[in-house]
């Protein structure tokens, strides 16, 4: 589409931020939406109508036909890439391309893209940060200018990430409007926010051996990068990384603000799940959920995802059992389960694989369970998503899983899981389970919390032996921790009660808002309010709480 750059700006000389951005800039300029605070009419947010802060007139904040036209070059390129693929894979890739293009269009509409609006050039430090982080690492920027308002690049390499980008930019915009209204006036200068929504920071710069002087991984000089998923506990790995509000809380936080999300996603990552006997259990079964009647075993069901990415090194990265999703390569050629076929005795095969340091914590738990099911019941479930659906049933992974009884026949419901005394939240692709931890904290038993190299935005509020029983990343102390709680039932009862009380407080309106204030609103000041002039106190904004 045609547009007029700001005076003195040559968009053709802008340094490309990534392959995605370079492609986008060739097709069309980034989308943007009108500044929407403080004169914004909040009651019209869901209708994508914005009030002009200077004239008071109402104007549309959405590009309609033009937005569809903007996605056309992206869709065309995606479809062209499928022509060299096999017929079945081609069909699958075409469906993925269509879904991704549709998600990008949705993302454009969510924040309110305005056709013809141009974004100011990126600050040199932001350009360097995005470039060094990695062109294929799905890093984004969100810009605000007094004339163009909020804008962001809605395109991502997958449908899921496009939806997450839309959710995050909506939360960022509303947080700034609510707590920094004085920063969004016509006389204020522009600002730009760098953020990521992938399950973990997918930059090769997490490898400290690459963080030497003279390399592109000069991480200490990067702009703040806000991540809405899991981050390393070791803050020295990426010192400018900011662990913002976990994306799963986004919809609930916006509702607590009184500004519901424009799009209610049904994706699993967008919901906060809890367990309630009265709501989730069968009528008349309440006695089965009393502590003394719970099954005295550790229970786990979950997917066979890899554990973190290769950049985390051999100490932490673990590939899944067979042919799984692995970054941009999609399918791994390595199948660990083939190792089991070398042994005539199944137990000997399981012990041999347990002796490997290449298996994920989830695989380790499942193998331990297969060797001794008297104290732990762990199986993979929902593995359908780990390989191409059209060939999974007859895949090598499925056949080996059936042969060695590693997969559950059916997923367990929350009501079934809650009948066990000990829950465990084994980390997955991002090193955690996001709000799977909260869900299990609300069950009648106590939680064995998997303490990995990663953490989520609320983990710092939880205390070992007060809200959970700690377990090491490699599960080397799992049997010992089980023995502790079995020998001291009161410990598990106390931990369970404390965990439920914490969740009840956290999920109140005040709890969610205060968490977002601490984890997103205050840290945003590094970018939008470095001199501390505009941030409104929490109690002043929410006096009714």
Image (cartoon, grey):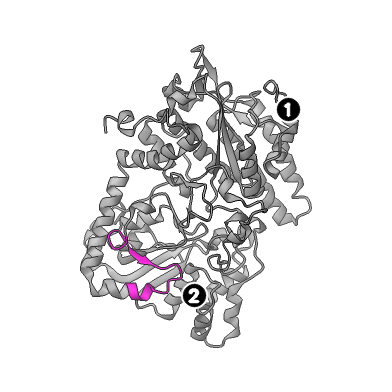
| Residue at mark 2 | 405
Q: CA distance from mark 2 to mark 1?
A: 62 Å
Q: Residue at x 28, y 46 (%)?
A: 505
The N terminus sits in image quarter = top right
Q: Position of residue 283 (x, y in %)?
A: 25, 55
Q: Is residue 509 left or right of residue 391?
A: left
- The answer to whether the residues at label 2 and label 1 have Cβ atoms under 8 Å apart is no
Q: Residue at x 67, y 41 (%)?
A: 17
Residue 78 in view (yes/no)? yes
- Asked if residue 41 lies in the magenta stretch, the reply is no
Q: Position of residue 79 (x, y in %)?
A: 73, 45
Answer few, some or many: residues within 10 Å of disc 1's Cα (few below 14, many 20 plus, some between 14 and 19).
Answer: few
Q: Hey, which quadrant is residue 147 in on the image?
A: top right
The vertical placement of 304 against 80, above or below, is: below
Answer few, some or many: residues within 10 Å of disc 2's Cα (few below 14, many 20 plus, some between 14 and 19).
Answer: some
Task: Name which of mark 2 and mark 1 comes first in the sequence.
Answer: 1
The vertical placement of 473 against 44, above or below, is: below
**Which numbered disc, 2 or 1, marks the residue closer to the eye?**
1
Q: Hey, which quadrant is residue 127 in on the image?
A: top right
What secondary structure is marked by label 2? loop
Q: Nearer the viewer, residue 525 or 20?
A: 525
- Asked if residue 467 lies in the magenta stretch, the reply is yes
What secondary structure is marked by label 1? loop
| Residue at mark 1 | 10
* Residue numbers of the magenta segment: 464-481
The vertical placement of 360 against 535, above or below, is: below
Residue 278 in view (yes/no)? no
Q: Is residue 459 left or right of residue 360?
A: left
């Amino acid at each position: 589409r045609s547009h007029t750059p700001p005076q003195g700006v040559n968009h053709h000389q802008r340094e490309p931020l990534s392959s995605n951005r370079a492609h986008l800039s060739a097709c069309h300029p980034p989308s943007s939406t009108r500044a929407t605070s403080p004169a914004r009419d909040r009651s019209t947010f869901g209708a994508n109508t914005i009030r002009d802060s200077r004239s008071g007139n109402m104007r549309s904040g959405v590009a309609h036909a033009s937005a569809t036209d903007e996605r056309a070059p992206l869709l065309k390129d995606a479809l062209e890439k499928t022509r060299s693929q096999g017929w079945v894979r081609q069909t699958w890739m075409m469906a993925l391309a269509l879904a991704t293009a549709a998600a990008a269009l949705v993302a454009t509409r969510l924040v309110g893209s305005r056709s013809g609006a141009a974004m100011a050039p990126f600050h040199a430090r932001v350009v360097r940060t995005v470039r060094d982080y990695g062109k294929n690492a799905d890093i984004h920027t969100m810009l605000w200018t007094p004339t163009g308002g909020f804008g962001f690049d809605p395109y991502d390499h997958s449908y899921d990430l496009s939806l997450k980008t839309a959710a995050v930019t909506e939360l960022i915009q509303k947080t700034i409007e609510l707590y920094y209204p004085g920063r969004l006036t016509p006389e204020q200068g522009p600002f730009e926010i760098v953020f990521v929504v992938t399950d973990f920071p997918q930059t090769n710069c997490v490898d400290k051996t690459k963080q030497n002087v003279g390399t592109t991984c000069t991480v200490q000089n990067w702009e703040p990068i806000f991540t809405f998923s899991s981050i390393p506990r070791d803050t020295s790995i990426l010192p400018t990384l900011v662990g913002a509000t976990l994306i799963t809380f986004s919809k609930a936080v916006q509702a607590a603000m009184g500004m519901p999300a424009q799009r209610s996603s049904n994706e699993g990552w967008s919901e906060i799940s809890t367990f309630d006997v009265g709501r989730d259990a069968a009528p008349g079964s309440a006695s089965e959920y009393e502590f003394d009647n719970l099954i005295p075993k550790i229970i786990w069901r979950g997917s066979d995802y890899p554990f973190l990415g290769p950049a985390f090194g051999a100490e932490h990265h673990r590939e899944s059992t067979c042919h799984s999703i692995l970054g941009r390569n999609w399918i791994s050629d390595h199948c660990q389960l083939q190792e089991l076929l070398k042994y005539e005795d199944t137990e000997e095969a399981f012990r041999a694989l347990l002796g490997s340091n290449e298996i994920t914590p989830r695989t380790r738990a499942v193998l331990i369970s297969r060797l001794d099911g008297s104290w732990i019941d762990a199986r993979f479930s929902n593995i359908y998503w780990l390989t191409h659906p059209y060939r999974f049933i007859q895949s090598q992974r499925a056949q080996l899983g059936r042969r060695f009884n590693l997969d559950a026949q059916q997923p367990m419901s929350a009501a079934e899981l809650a009948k066990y005394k000990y829950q465990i939240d084994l980390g997955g692709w991002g090193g955690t389970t996001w709000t799977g931890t909260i869900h299990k904290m609300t069950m009648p038993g106590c939680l064995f919390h998997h303490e990995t190299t990663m953490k989520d935005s609320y983990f710092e509020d939880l205390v070992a032996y007060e809200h959970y029983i700690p377990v090491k990343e490699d599960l080397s102390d799992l049997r010992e921790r089980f023995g502790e709680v079995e020998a001291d039932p009161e410990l598990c009862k106390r931990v369970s009660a404390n965990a439920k009380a914490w969740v009840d407080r956290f999920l109140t309106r005040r709890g969610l808002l205060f968490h977002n204030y601490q984890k997103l609103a205050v840290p945003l000041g590094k970018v939008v309010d470095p001199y501390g002039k505009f941030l409104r106190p929490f109690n002043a904004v929410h006096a009714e709480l």
